[in-house]
Amino acid sequence: MAEYRAATPDQEAFRSAVLDAGLLIDSGVPGVYGRGVVFDDVYSAIDRRITAAAGDDDAERLRFPPLIPREQFESTGYLSSFPHLAGSVFGFDGTEAEALEQSERADRHEDWSGFQTMGDLVLTPAACYPVYPAVAARGPLPPGGLTVDAGAAYVYRNEPSGDPARMQMFHQRELVRIGEPEAVAGWRDTWRDRAVGLLKGLGLDADLEVATDPFFGRSGRMMAASQRQQELKFEVQVPIAGAEPTAVASFNYHQQHFAETFGIRLADGGIAHTSCLGFGLERITLAMFKEHGLDPATWPDRPVRELWPD
Amino acid sequence: MAEYRAATPDQEAFRSAVLDAGLLIDSGVPGVYGRGVVFDDVYSAIDRRITAAAGDDDAERLRFPPLIPREQFESTGYLSSFPHLAGSVFGFDGTEAEALEQSERADRHEDWSGFQTMGDLVLTPAACYPVYPAVAARGPLPPGGLTVDAGAAYVYRNEPSGDPARMQMFHQRELVRIGEPEAVAGWRDTWRDRAVGLLKGLGLDADLEVATDPFFGRSGRMMAASQRQQELKFEVQVPIAGAEPTAVASFNYHQQHFAETFGIRLADGGIAHTSCLGFGLERITLAMFKEHGLDPATWPDRPVRELWPD
């Protein structure tokens, strides 16, 4: 079992307020929530706002489920960097007698894990992962490459926390740029400004920071230092609950990593570069409730009210 | 590993056509697909059409992620009826040395399952499952009960198949009625007609049938017979690919099962009844392409064109 990270008092108070207001619905497992209608309305409005901001990108819309093939996942090296965050899907393939014993144990809430075996699927760790093999399968990129709008996709992180902004299952609103290095870097730079502007436009106190991924273990510290030094990851951070601001959007520049793994070629035969941008939709929604209050009917007219043109 | 069910020649031909047209995107694992923009447009239009048809229900909109707490799942008895279809989420909680060995095995596509342990979550087996504990937590129902619109929720079935209409991860567009037995039965009867009309209105050859769930094993055959005799399950079936029509919507009447499991009380203190209605959104979308052709621009003006009022 992954270690539970307790909430700070600020986070606990905000979590209670959000649950009491029916914005989120407690499932009983930390970081797994249902969403009430008011939360869902704000969430959807933010998603539409991002879609509008992406209008200039002429992105191709693709949608992927929250499970990806285990074999592809193995090829990405995710288990080397983030073994603690991954989730794999197990299932039953036994006899009737074993099924009976399994269900009897489950009825008593006893351990039935011994009847489960690993299957062909893992939980999607980041919304861009299924994009790369799908694009690679088409053959070489067109000149100028490609931008993919992967929509609001569920991703999983095995990190139970009492902070309502740190969910185990949440939506990344994802855009992916694949192409020549300069095109990819230029896209990322344009979006850094655009993302900060979009979030400030929602009345949020957004800051851009060079950031690192939560790599596992001692060797992970070196990977993080190298990532920071090369400025491969940026985050837009806003205050939600607690002293530390929370990342609500992140830009990752993968250089040739994914293109090499899955074989994405440029029009001229060279290896493509890739970069992705993910907005944490639940986090941005929570930040809105924290900043402007739990009842959207009382929110300021501008700029926030424009979210709901109807 | 669950047994692979091969496609019939008709299903295989339709699958190839749908992939070649870019409507679905092959992931490499049977029954797990990405969706292209044309598929997604039709899918979304059908989702809106169902939302419009549900307008009279005054349903409360709730949304839930594709994972539910294992403990709740254990309480439902799902593992007794459908052990072969369930998926459980495992994760890593080991040392740095173990993480290294796990990732080295994964790099070589060897077995790394021994490093994974069962966590607190399972894949959502049906879109109505998280609704019951959420409603139970509120206390007794208001008089007349409650209707919940659980939206288009991802659900998992461990049944790899070559039939493109039999997916492992797909969306159920779900409505749930909870209340007095007569109110629940009346709601189901109203929706049986409404659902058939809605699907016929899309130009599909829809038929209502008494149906059974795919219960596991020998004792499952008795459960299926009892379910059929009591007419607890109905399906709306349409032809997609192959000789047998495919269920694209199903009504399940659970009587007191879920209300008793999670403690959902009527206003007068009695145990509630529950019924759910799920539309298989990907299946309906596939049926549209099979019936009307792979290019929506060539679809007949009426009644299908009305799906896209813009």
Image: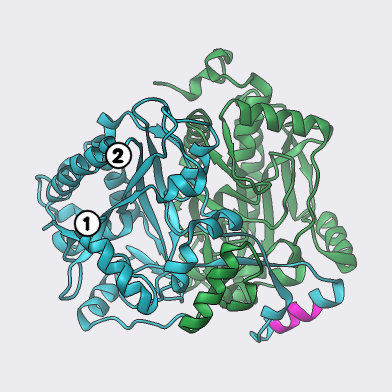
Chain colours: A green, B cyan
With B214 as the anchor, is A259 left or right in this view? right
Same chain for mark 1 and mark 2? The answer is yes
Name the residue at 19% across, 43% down. B189
Per the image, the residue denoted by label 2 is B181
The segment highlighted magenta reads B100-105
- Quarter of the image with the C terminus of chain B is top left
Give the residue type at disc 1: Glu
Q: Residue A62 appears at what percent x and percent y? A: 43, 56
Task: Decide whether residue A98 is among the magenta residues.
Answer: no
At 48% from the left edge and 37% from the top edge, which residue is drawn?
Answer: B135
Give the secondary structure at mark 1: loop
Q: Would you identify the image quadrant in which residue A114 lies? A: bottom right
Residue at mark 1: B231
Front one among A299 and B254: B254
Circle 1 chain: B
Locate residue B61, reporting x and y percent: 42, 34
| Residue A224 in which image quadrant | bottom right
The amino acid beneath tag 2 is Pro
Instruction: Kindly tell me whether residue B213 is visible in this rendering.
Output: yes
Residue at 55 percent across and 76 percent down: it is A101
| Quarter location, residue A155 | bottom right
